[in-house]
Image (tube, helix red, strand yellow):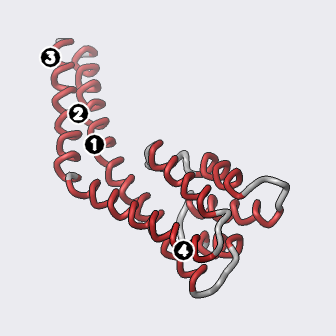
Amino acid sequence: MIRAAALLLVAASCAGLGFVKSQALSARIRDLLILRKILRLLTGEISYGGTPLPEAFYRIGGKVGEPFRDFLQDLSLDMRRYEGESFSELFDRNADCHLKGTRLTREDLEEWKEFGRMLGYLDREMQLSTLKSFDETLAWKIGEQKEGLPARKKLYQSLGVMGGLFLVIVFA
C-alpha cells in the first residue's frame, strides 16, 4: 500500500515537473515582452518628453509589475542619490538584485546588463539608437521563442509524464 502510494507520488511529481517547465517557457516570453514594453516607454520618455533617465525610470516603474517595478524605481532612486557609482554599476547591481527571480535566462540578463552599460553614458540620439537596436534584438528573440512554443511545451509535458511512468516501471 505504501509502495503504491510512493510510486503514484513519483509519477505525479515527474508529471508536475514537466508541466512546470512548460509554463516556464511561457513565463520567459512574458518577461521578454515586459522588457520590450520598458524599452518602448523609455523611448517615449526620452524622445518626446526629454525626460532625464532617473525620472523616466521611476515613471515607467509605475507602469509595469513586480519585480520590474522595483528594479526601475530602485535604479531611479540610486541614480538620484549618486554615491560615486557609475550608471552601469547601478544598473548591474539592481538587475542582479531584482531580476534574478524572473524567468529570464542568464543570457537574457547579461544582454540586459550590456544594454544598461551602453545606455548610461551616451547622448540623447545615441540612447535612442541603443534603445531601437535592443528593441529589435528583443523582437527577434521573442519571435524565435514563440515559433516553437507549442511543440516545446508539449514535449516538456510528455517527457514529465513519460519519465514518471518510466520510474514507476523501474521501481515496481
Query: Mark 4 or 3, which is nearer the eye?
Result: 4
Q: Amino acid at mark 2?
A: Gly
The CA span between labels 4 and 3 is 58 Å
Quadrant assignment for the C terminus: top left
Residue under circle 1?
19
Is there CB contact under 8 Å for labels 1 and 4? no
| Residue 77 on image: x %, y % | 75, 64
> In the rendered view, does 76 fall on the left or right side of 127?
right
Residue designated by label 3: 169
Q: Secondary structure at mark 3?
A: helix
Which residue: 65% across, 55% down? 91
Query: Viewed as shown, does residue 44 lie left or right of 94?
Result: left
Disc 1 marks a residue whose amino acid type is Phe
Residue at figure coordinates x 25%, y 14% from the top left: 3
Q: Does the residue at mark 3 contact the one at mark 2 (Cβ under 8 Å)?
A: no
Assign the N terminus to one quadrant of the image: top left
Q: Secondary structure at mark 4?
A: helix
Local SS, label 2: helix
Give the alpha-carbon distance from disc 3 to disc 1, as whole Å.
21 Å
Q: Residue at x 57, y 83 (%)?
A: 47
Mark linked to residue 128: 4
Q: Which is more foreground, mark 2 or mark 4?
A: 4
Q: CA distance from mark 1 to mark 2?
A: 7 Å
Q: Are dots 3 and 1 in contact, CB under 8 Å?
A: no
Determine which of the numbered discs, if any, sits on residue 160 in the image: 2
The amino acid type, in three-letter code, at marker 4 is: Leu
Mark 1 and mark 4 lie on one chain; the one further toward the N terminus is: 1
